[in-house]
Image: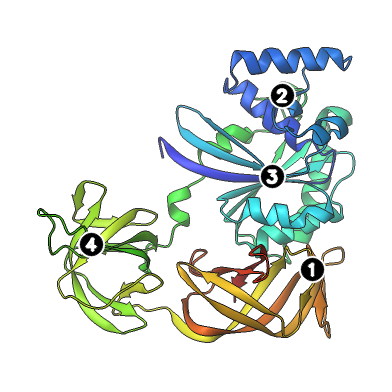
Amino acid sequence: MKGELLRFTTAGSVDDGKSTLIGRLLYDSKSIFQDQLAAIENTSKKKGLDEIDFSLLTDGLKDEREQGITIDVAYRYFNTPNRKFIIADTPGHIQYTRNMVTGASTANAALILIDARNGVIEQTKRHSYIASLLQIPHVLVCINKMDLVNYEKGAFEKIKEQYKDFAAKLDIQDFKFIPISALKGDNVVNRSKNMEWYNGPTLLHSLENIPVANDLNHIDFRFAVQTVLRPHTDEYHDYRGYAGRISSGILRIGDQVTALPSQMQSRVKKIHCAHLELQEAYAPQSISIELEDDIDISRGDMVVKTTNQPQNSQEIDAMICWMGENPMQLNGKYSIQHTSRSGRAIIKEIVYVVDLNELKRIEGKTTMEKNGIARIKIKTTTPLFFDSYRTNRNTGSFILIDETNFNTVGAGMII
């Protein structure tokens, strides 16, 4: 666990205090440079505030600072003696749903903030649904602004029960509740003297002890080839290596593997990681593989264990978040990128669109606007080698690209 990287995203309604919480986390964990601290202290004084406005550490855009809200996804990095962290501070507005999906797509954990005065609201449900959809393994429900309800245990317990009732409908495996005050620093890094009735961990302690390694798929070996290495040097005259990143699973010298789509088989001769030769490699390492047999493999192919292969199909059933300025259209044609494999796809069916306010399914739609989420069926021009998103977030995801301007317009999760 020591030195391990944790990616987490923050979500919540506007003014729930996400940026303030992250600023407090950085400040109390002593992860702010002195010049940064001096700058936000001066800005806070100019705004006539008695306390430091910690949201200034993350709200970097001019519009965000003026409105006191987060518009774009803001990434922040910090570390403690126990762990390294990457934070994605995502916006709370409904029109920025796509931004939350972007920030949450690689997250190991989600921090969902709830205003202790307001309880569970529509935005809470929407963000929790997206966290569930994206299969984020761990959810920390931070009930913020406890100082504004006099640190009352009853207010915390009421919201806790509200959220549990709602979360029972979702696919969230692990969630914890922490009463905090981001503004005052209660239970963020240091334990609160105002809430002695709470005997659970602080937010930072929880983040430091989330078991990230257990979230990786160590069973299904998936290796999408990104390039073929042929140095043609005197030292490596006949060398042929297949380079890429392990999406999941473990590979060892001597393992029997199959190349897709050719179905040609061989055994692993050597594994290289930079200048090192390894006996075994595992996700998410970037490596090159040398096989015993000279078989035809190129970019876009996938190397897997012969006895454990992914699904292989041109018919894909998926949930998608639409990011394009133009609506998604039934029978619309797009480019598709799945692992290192490219092709073209057509929207064959929009099974239903999700009403993000009521979390209901709307059937019979032939189009979907930006920031919408839907279940669709697509057909691709070339077979894809995939697992369900639930099983493997790397091989179970894809993006759709507008062929006219090359913008990413959709992020898909294979069912």
Discs 1/3, front: 1
Which numbered disc covers residue 73? Answer: 3
Discs 3/2, front: 3
Q: Earlier in the sequence, mark 1 or mark 3?
A: 3
Residue type for callout 4:
Arg
Which numbered disc covers residue 185? Answer: 2
Which numbered disc covers residue 406? Answer: none
Q: CA distance from mark 4 to mark 3?
A: 39 Å
Residue type for callout 2:
Gly
Discs 1/2, front: 1
Query: Is residue 180 shown to the viewer in this render?
Result: no
Q: Earlier in the sequence, mark 1 or mark 2?
A: 2
User: At 26% across and 47% down in the image, what residue appears?
Assistant: 274
SS category of the residue bearing label 4: loop
Q: 374 and 160: which one is in front? A: 374
Residue at the spot of label 4:
230
Residue type for callout 1:
Asn
- Quarter of the figure with the C terminus: bottom right
Discs 4/3, front: 4
Q: Position of residue 134 (x, y in %)?
A: 63, 62
Asked if the residue under mark 3 is in contact with the one under mark 1, i.e. CB atoms within 8 Å, the reply is: no
Q: Please say if 370 is above or below 202.
A: below
